[in-house]
Image (cartoon, grey):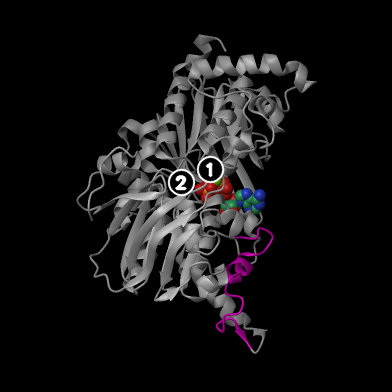
Amino acid sequence: MASTQAASVPLLEMHGITKQFPGVLANDRVDFDVRAGEVHTLFGENGAGKSTLMKILYGLYQPDAGEIILGGQPTVIRSPAMAIAHGIGMIHQHFMLVPTMTVAQNVALGLKSSRGLLTDSGRVSARIRELSDTYGLAIDPGALVHQLSVGERQRVEIIKTLYRDVSLLVLDEPTAVLTPGEVRELFRVLKEMIASGLAVVFISHKLNEVLELSDRITVLRAGRKIATVDAADASRDELATMMVGHEVAAISLPPGTPGDVRLSVAELRVPGDRAAEAVSGLSLDVRAGEIVGIAGVSGNGQRELAEAIAGLRPVTSGRIVIDGVDVTGKRPAGVRHAGLGYVPEERMRDGLIGDFTVTENLLLVDSTSPAYFRHGFIRPEQVRRHCAELVHDFTVRTPSLDTPARNLSGGNIQKLIMARELSRSPGVLLVAQPTRGIDVASAQYIHERLFRQRAAGTAVIVVSEDLDEIMTICDRVLVMYEGNVVGTVDPRVTSRETVGLLMAGTAAATPG
Ligand SMILES: Nc1ncnc2c1ncn2[C@@H]1O[C@H](COP(=O)(O)OP(=O)(O)OP(=O)(O)O)[C@@H](O)[C@H]1O
Ligand SMILES: [Mg+2]
């Protein structure tokens, strides 16, 4: 595009975009524009219509009304291929790479010029190296995708779009699955990209990130555009208020009095998938009425520890005791019977059936509970009332209780699973990444539910890579590094920097 034109005409304008789904007006006459060289963030509650608006831009959905103007020209985008031809790239929250292929093969996939992957592979690899040099995206074109970390896979997705010469890159919640280090790395790359004149549309629920990265922020609520503001003038409170339509009171952990030990882990050793040992002689106690956080960069044994406690992974040695019952080596049902409630990190995969309705998904684990069943017969009244209550309390945005779960927005699916799991009262509650992908107001509600569990005498363990979260809602924070606890800190008196150093394995353990 000519530079004079670039200065006056936005790269993209969307006017009056409207999109109706059964029972939901996902976009209601939305106006949105993006200029070259800026990061324009879409911010809003779960289900506000952010992904829908960007899927319309990317040609995945057709709008019912409204128009898209690219570089001053009204344009109809019928497919992602057309979007790409117009210089628009989109990285979805769930990556779309083929794990068994190399980086270069994934990048070449779907390219018109690559009739034979083999013949082109030399050229593709050379161009990948060029792009990784330009933007500092370290990646080996020959590596197999399944061997890469999440952060590296995202780099491949970015290279894949850059390879197609995009001028506008849409990233839908790119940081939800990244570690803090990977987020910093991503931001560095995005800043390089905008410095070279690209435009970025960014979607995130994390206010700190949004304020750091954005030039402008557009707030959507219930399908409508509320406002577009300059990030430099915006405050956290103002954005949160615009998002939900009323003030969001900050919550803080009320003081508590821990009781008896309900979960005791002693000298636990757990094998890893690739490494011989993922957890190396770890011990921890969690008491009734306390929330203990497990912080750490992902891949330091947190997942294996949680799986071992839940009975999903064998242990090499050591002991796990719940309320006085030795559950070491027990199967998941046995551990649950001893009193463990478990919300896994991979709950989209492990915790939900997309074709089932909202109600059916809420019943999944409690399908034999006397609250729902009597003499083998379902009690439809009780079921509906209970499910309606959960949907209301957790603000799961759904047209009805009979909507298939797969039609819900990303965050609302998360909320649905959390509603099911947090409505029970286990003796020990182990939750991984409780608010990943969840908007600010709903995240606060989930935290409140965890406080309520604590007040009821549950021993709560939260595994989270979100340091802000873990420092706000925990009584004690254990930092894991290379399979063991390298420090225990009191989040009320400890700086994030100290915890960050512990996470990096560079500070001495503090007694706690
Ligand atoms: N394919 C679909 N079929 C039916 N309803 C849909 C479909 N896609 C989205 N919706 C509905 O449209 C609304 C907006 O969804 P969208 O995915 O755009 O929200 P979002 O702002 O991206 O939310 P989140 O932060 O949770 O990802 C939601 O109520 C959702 O349930
Ligand atoms: Mg979304």
Q: Is residue 361 magenta?
A: yes
Report whether 422 appears left or right of 153: left
Q: Which residue, given by chain and number where applicable, does mark 1 sit on?
A: 50
Tell me which residue sits at (38%, 50%) in the image: 484
Q: From the Cβ of disc 2, is ligand 1 less than 8 Å away?
A: yes
Q: Is residue 184 magenta?
A: no
Q: Which residue, given by chain and number where applicable, does mark 2 sit on?
A: 44
Q: From the Cβ of disc 1, is ligand 1 less than 8 Å away?
A: yes
Q: Could you tell me how far apart the alpha carbons at marks 1 and 2 are, in whole angstroms?
A: 7 Å
Residue 224 locus on image (x, y percent): 51, 46
Residue 330 locus on image (x, y percent): 54, 69
Report whether 345 appears left or right of 65: left
Q: Amino acid at mark 2?
A: Gly
From which residue to which does the magenta span run? Answer: 352-374
Residue 218 image-quadrant placement:
top left
Do callouts 1 and 2 mark residues in contact (Cβ within 8 Å)?
yes
Q: Is residue 281 above or below residue 153?
A: below
Tell me which residue sits at (66%, 58%) in the image: 354
